[in-house]
Amino acid sequence: MIGAAALFPLEWARPYALLALALPLAVLLGSRLFERPFEIATGTLDLWRRARAAQAPPSRRARTRIPPAVWILVLALTLGALALAGPRPPSPEAWRALHVLVDRTPSMELALGKGTRRDRALAMARAWIERTEPDASVEWAESAAPLGPGDDREDALWVTDRAPFPPPRHAGFVASGGPSVPGPVAIDGTARYDWDGERLVEVPGGAPVRRVEVSGTLPAPLAGVLDAWARARGVEIAGRGEGRSALVVHAVDPGLQSVPVRTIEAGRDGWTATGTVAGVARSSDPGGPLETWLADLDGRAVVTSGPGRIDSRWASMEDAQGDPAAFAVSWARLFDAAVLPPPGVIELAERLAAGEEASAPPRAAEPAASESRSLAAWLALASLAGAVVALILSNPRSRGS
Amino acid sequence: MPARSDARLPCPGVRFEPGFARRVEALAARLALARERREGGGVPSRLGGGAEFVGYRPYSPGDDLRSLDWDLWARSRRPWVRVARREAGERWLIVLDASASMGVGPPGKLQRAAEVAAGIAALALKTGAEARVAAPAALTGPREIAIARRSSLVDLLTFLESLRAEGASSAWPGRRAMAHVSRVFLIGDLRDRTPEEALGLRSPGRELCLIQLLAPIEIAPPGEGAVEWWDPERGARFALEIDARSRAAYEVELAAELERWRSLCARRGVPYGCFSSALGFEEILQRSVV
């Protein structure tokens, strides 16, 4: 059986208004029950009788025929009831799976009211979904990186704190807004820099101690660079399981002999090194994807990194060729990029005011709403026109008496 | 079945517009002049010849055989009829049907019939004839009024405005009322009489003119749909689904009846015209009495 939805592919904004369809039905039934022929005085009734006698008697169906004016009125009432119910095209199937991307940049954790900007933005997102797409299946995802063009999809809803500018072309968004939040914005060695709302204030020795955890054994050149970098940044190098680490460096465990080792030559930023590597660096881990930082000549990843972690496959490394300083700076940049900021230290740009609350539906939803209004308006207009025509036709003068 | 109240009739009364009397008098003057020209030119008016001889013209079908000049026919081997101009002192009787069926319209048949009657009465005054307007079917008020001078025209219009389309058709004026009447004008829908009955009003020395008025809805029925016709005089009802077939059958019946009136009147030399009440009274008079 063909589904009703296939025959009448519309959704209704106010389905209870479809009860008004009973009105045209009642008019139709009433007109059949109480139908009375149009009464006209004439002085030639005998001629009509003679004319009728010359003809076959009319069928019963003809006797009870409903006048065109009633049909048109019924049609007008039907269209009016449909317009009242607010027809709208069905949401596209893709829309049924709404992708909600939650911004997890540090500013989302800033205080707002009794919670955080993230709490407020999530509440707004849930309210919007409940109000406009209660039946949609929602897929939640988090993004540690700022939301951008790569996330701009018609079925996406960004949950963030600052209304994106320029706004996404396709995706919708809800933004919590929020005032500026003074606090630590940076650390340099042991010094911490706070923003008091107007200017930066240095707090000597105020930097929290960060830890770097190294699992496995780094080749000597790399271990030396890491030591130097840790001293410069005021970071402690600790063993596994000694509390929360700002950076975890996964190195090759020399005790594991099962992984084949190969000799390679690799380099970047003006340095080249030869040595042995065990396996291929991971491209992802439970913390998310890892980007390749160093690859051998065959393109196999040797070092990959992500926020708070580095995976190095160097089992042994000879001293790098080229400028030794270039080798150190290159690795130090990798450590700087990967190390997590200490808790509570949030960049000044993130601490600035995020403006007012704002939201915009995904662009895919807007044409549907527009079509819905347009369809209802056309139906209402047709209903009005039908009622006028029915009124004109029902006027006795239009029937010639 | 009892007759229905005329309250449901579309056009039961008569109401003359301001200035109607002047329009009627002007029309009567034009008609009188036209008739005189036609008769003077040897062409008979639709009302036939008068008493003052003015000449001859060839006979044409429908002419009164009494006007044939047998001597001239014998001499010229061709039928000729005597043409005469009317004389003063004639008596005209204008019989107006005011039965309920005359309230059908719009425009109302009674309204148009009253206007035509007023026009004929004015024409009588213009030609020096004496006229009486009778409405035998009238249920209330006077049923007749005599018009002998110009001032009587106002009384005539008042009389006509007092008429209402009601009741059934009554008997026509009797022998006494017809005495000394030289012309009888019968104005109505003629739906309650046969042509033979109407033509019976004609007698030697008394001309007859029949003016039949039908409402537009009686001439051209309305479009398709269920209709209940009702006869205002008898109260009879007749429900019918009008469609192209029934409408065509009705028109055939109507055409047959009108043809019967026309042919019988033509055979007897009686002027007859069937007009829609939508037609102006001036045009009806032009086509009836000139």
Image: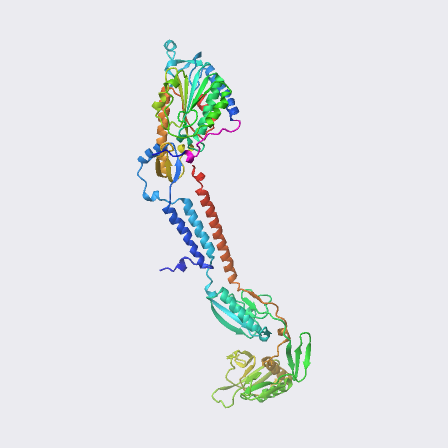
Is residue B37 visible in this depiction of the protein? no
Q: Position of residue B99 (x, y in %)?
A: 40, 29
Label total for image: 0
Query: Magenta span covers which residues?
Result: B6-19
What predominant SS class does the magenta segment belong to? loop
Looking at the image, residue B205 sits to the left or right of residue A308; the answer is: left
B10 vs A151, nearest the viewer: B10
A342 vs A217, nearest the viewer: A342
Quarter of the image with the N terminus of chain B in it: top left
Residue placed furthest toward the front: B141
Res A222 → quadrant: bottom right
Q: Is the residue A78 above or below the residue A215 in the image?
A: above
Q: Position of residue B31 (x, y in %)?
A: 48, 20
Is residue A279 visible in this depiction of the protein? yes
Looking at the image, residue A228 sits to the left or right of residue B46; the answer is: right
> Residue at the location (44% across, 12% down)?
B52
Res A59 → quadrant: top left
